[in-house]
Image (spheres, grey):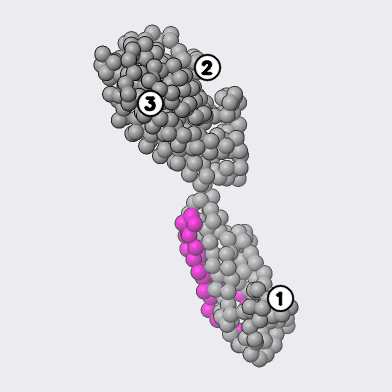
Amino acid sequence: SRRILRRRIRWADVRLAVPESVQLIHDRFGRSRRRRRWLLPTAVVFVVIAAIGLSQVATPSSPLIAEDVRSRAMEVSRRADGFRDMLVRMGSVDRVELTTVTDEALTRISSVRTFLAGFEDGPGEIAGVVVLFDLALSSWAEGTQGLAEHLLAAADGDPSLGLSDLIIDDLLEIRAGDRLYQRAVIALAAADITQPVSPMPEVRFLPEGYPIVPGARTLLAQAQVEGSPLALNASLILEQVTTVPEWVLDTEGSLVLDASEELVVRVIVTNSGNAASDPMTLVIEVVGGDGSAQTTSLPVAVLAAGAKTTVTFDPLAVTPGRSYSLVVRLELAPGLVADSRTLLFRVNEGTVVNTSTTEGG
């Protein structure tokens, strides 16, 4: 009979068996869509309690299964701690961290749900624990995934007016998971198991007492603020500038080139952002102590997030014994500079001894 009961815990059956007025925690503001989302966990709670009551005799496998469930809860607990910490400091969280923490939580939740599915026909005395834990996992998965998606949509300028309500729904879903899990802990403590089992760990994805509506508004504002780290942005930087012949540091810490009449400049450009860049222009200017100047530029192709490229310029004329300044500019458009660097160097009149090893340069 318990097996038949568990198999009947389905959405369609719940809608027929449970009055619409039955709500688990109805702070869903009376919206019919939100009420319907609470019917399943509400009904299952009552059905689970009934299932526990029907169980009179504990089986020898119950303690082992309970310990396995506790072990999986520990895995989820670590992901929940990371997610909760991220939520508190969301104003400084970037897009990579948000997606990484959320994906790790979803992956762990999925693996634990797969594990719990193996106990569909397990001992009746812990059936309620397994069902409640699985419902908690389902709510956590839906809430965390939805929250990440809606915050990123807000950061990317989605004009949808309903984003605030969606984020509220996501937070309510996550809190429902927290509360369903607490009921699973209570159910395990009340289960008729033949020998003691270790208590379940605390698992909470939301900080205790988290204000749902004000919290949702704050999260939305943080995501939409100009310059939000959650937004898709390219960030091109001048990672390294080198020359041929290669410059070295002398004993005074100045850049020196071996005697040469030509200078080849190589620049490594990196996209340290989270979105592909637009085409840009790399400009170099070599100014001599006598006031002479040489300027040249090359295009920088589109770079994917995290990608880099090396731009090599044609040789420029230099004179041994003279000092120069090298200005490197990465331009988004004429007059709009993304990054720049100025380096002073001199061309030696004779062979230069490489002293960089003694200076650590």
Q: Label 3 is placed on what type of residue?
A: Pro
Q: Residues within 10 Å of mark 1 (few under 14, many from 20)?
A: few
Question: Which of pointers 1 and 3 indicates the residue nearer the eye?
Answer: 3
Q: Which residue is mark 3?
A: 63
Asked if the magenta segment contains residue 187, the reply would be no
Foreground: 289 or 79?
Answer: 79
Residue 145 visible? The answer is no
Q: Residue at x 37, y 11 (%)?
A: 53
The residue segment tinted magenta is 293-318
Q: Position of residue 13 (x, y in %)?
A: 30, 14
Q: Earlier in the sequence, mark 3 or mark 2?
A: 2
- For label 1, the SS is loop
Q: Label 1 is placed on what type of residue?
A: Gly
In the displayed structure, would residue 194 be above or below residue 293? above
Q: Residues within 10 Å of mark 3 (few under 14, many from 20)?
A: some
Question: Which of pointers 3 and 2 indicates the residue nearer the eye?
Answer: 3
Q: Earlier in the sequence, mark 1 or mark 3?
A: 3
Q: Looking at the rendered structure, which numbered label has been put on residue 27?
A: 2
Foreground: 250 or 278?
Answer: 250
Q: Position of residue 335 (x, y in %)?
A: 63, 61
Foreground: 235 or 10?
Answer: 10
Asked if the magenta segment contains residue 313, the reply would be yes
- For label 2, the SS is loop
Q: Residue at x 53, y 79 (%)?
A: 314
- For label 3, the SS is helix
Task: Kindly indicate whether the residue at mark 1 contacts the one at mark 2 (C-beta within 8 angstroms).
Answer: no
Question: Quick one: quadrant of the N terminus?
Answer: top left
Q: Work out how far the residue at label 3 is from the one at label 2, CA to CA, in angstroms.
A: 37 Å
Q: Earlier in the sequence, mark 2 or mark 1?
A: 2
Q: Which residue is mark 1?
A: 253
Residue 25 visible? The answer is yes
